[in-house]
Image (cartoon, rainbow, N blue to C red):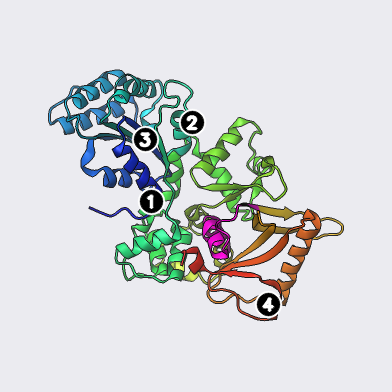
Amino acid sequence: METIIGRTEEKEILKHVIKSREASLVAIYGRRRVGKTFLVHTYFNDLLAFEVTAVYGGNLKDQLKVFTAALSKVTGLPVKEPDSWISGFQVLQQYLQGLNKRKKQVVFIDEFPWFETRRSGFLGAFAHFWNTWASRQNHIIVVICGSAASWMIRNVVNNKGSLHQRITQKIKLEPFTLAETRVYFNSRGIKLDFYQILQLYMVFGGIPQYLKNVQPGHSATQTIQRNCFDKNGFLTGEFDNLYGSLFEKSDQHIKVVRALAKTPKGLSRQEIIDVCELTSGGWTTEILEELEETGFIRSIVPYQHAAKDAIYRLIDEYSIFYLKFMDGNRSNAKNKWLQMSTGNAYKIWSGMAFEAVCLKHVLQIKSALGIGAIQSEESSWRSAGGKNNQGAQIDLLIDRADRCINLCEMKFYSGEFMIDKRYAGELEQKMRVFAEITKTKKTVFLTMVTTYGVKQNSYAQALVQHSITMEDLFGI
């Protein structure tokens, strides 16, 4: 049996579920290919009494057919296809009633949202099954999974009807961190240094199913070429499939993602509405919430601003990479990525991708700064400039309860990063504008987050109080 990498909190929750003396209804959600099904299969293993996976895009008849086939498989007998979900769950109940009640029995319904086809009555029938029978069986654990995280939250976790407050445990499964990615590679015999792993993470993110396609003995460049640019590359057709499987009207979600990809520093809600020609009503709010809940974008409230002023940034590594290099690229040249990775577009992308990685590893940055135990708030800050000030932007600002602020500058570089006279001037201006406009009374520390650290010279010594490296992002 394969080992579960990371997932410490999730395993504790599932451990509690098994030990519970009551029935459990567990909702697990997270984006496509993040490892939800693997977690359930591996952790519960021999406790699985029934398992079924919905058909993407299937109608009521399709879904009832796969449900019937799953029942036939576990019973070992032909099962007549039910004419409704109420009848289907009655058959499942009859089967479960005949199982050993001294042992936990797990019912696993995967891609739960896909079962809820138009006018199918699935959600109501499931709620009836849980409320009238399963919830009263102390040995029953029902696990429902879904990649459409926003749907799971809206219709299950925050259900206002028959499933209201019925969920006993919920798990939002996140992608691997850099540290977990390194452990995962080691478990598969893949020996790569921090820089190579970081390069792969900047393309694949921490998505286990993407990382599974990394082969021992292959460099990051070889792996990216094979998966993203070769004719039969695993990720060549992933973009449309990814968004299409998560969102009903994915064209609008993709429109927002494309707009954010063109503006690495982010857009406000109103700017997104203007660029994407959306309405200012609830539909735009729903799109942004769905994209954020599934981990594609992140909203950061600027320092000294209200939540309504949040700036949205694209932080999904694969989406950033796809839209920069793969979208519309029909070439299958064997050295395509090697050629691309020496151009100016690569430098622009790598900066944006590295910032996205850093924003997902703020806890590691705080730990490296020795402020993990200090209460703090992370935000961004930008000023359009005016008569007396030039514009400035800070992508990560850590506002600490000990009356200090870390202004973080994130730079991806193949060696030690050198602060020259021009960049030193930019940093000095940024810190000056920040102090003048915010009128902060707190001590401000300039913090550089780079791959191999900052080369020591007079500019670095005068400006930089803290230097964080990629090893710190790995938790080393």
Instruction: Say which amino acid is labelled 3.
Output: Val
Q: Count numbered badges in the picture.
A: 4
The residue under the point 70% across, 81% down is 458
Residue labelled with disc 3 = 26
Badge 2 element: helix
Q: Distance between the residues labelled 3 and 1?
A: 17 Å
Residue receiving disc 2: 154
Where 185 sits versus 296, above or below? below
Q: What element carries label 4?
A: helix
- Label pair 4/3, CB-CB below 8 angstroms: no
Q: What stretch is highlighted in magenta?
A: 351-379
Using the image, tell me which numbered label, if any, was put on residue 45. none
Distance from the alpha carbon under mark 4 to that under mark 1: 40 Å
Residue 339: horizontal and vertical position, in percent?
Answer: 48, 70
Q: Where is residue 435 in the image (x, y as percent from the top left)?
A: 78, 59
Q: How far apart are marks 4 and 2 (CA)?
A: 51 Å
Residue 229 visible at all: no
Task: Report the residue marked by disc 4.
Answer: 461
Q: Position of residue 23 (x, y in %)?
A: 31, 29
- Earlier residue among tags 4 and 2: 2
* Coordinates of residue 367 in the picture (x, y in percent): 53, 61
Q: Mark 1 points at which residue?
A: 8
Discs 3/2, front: 3
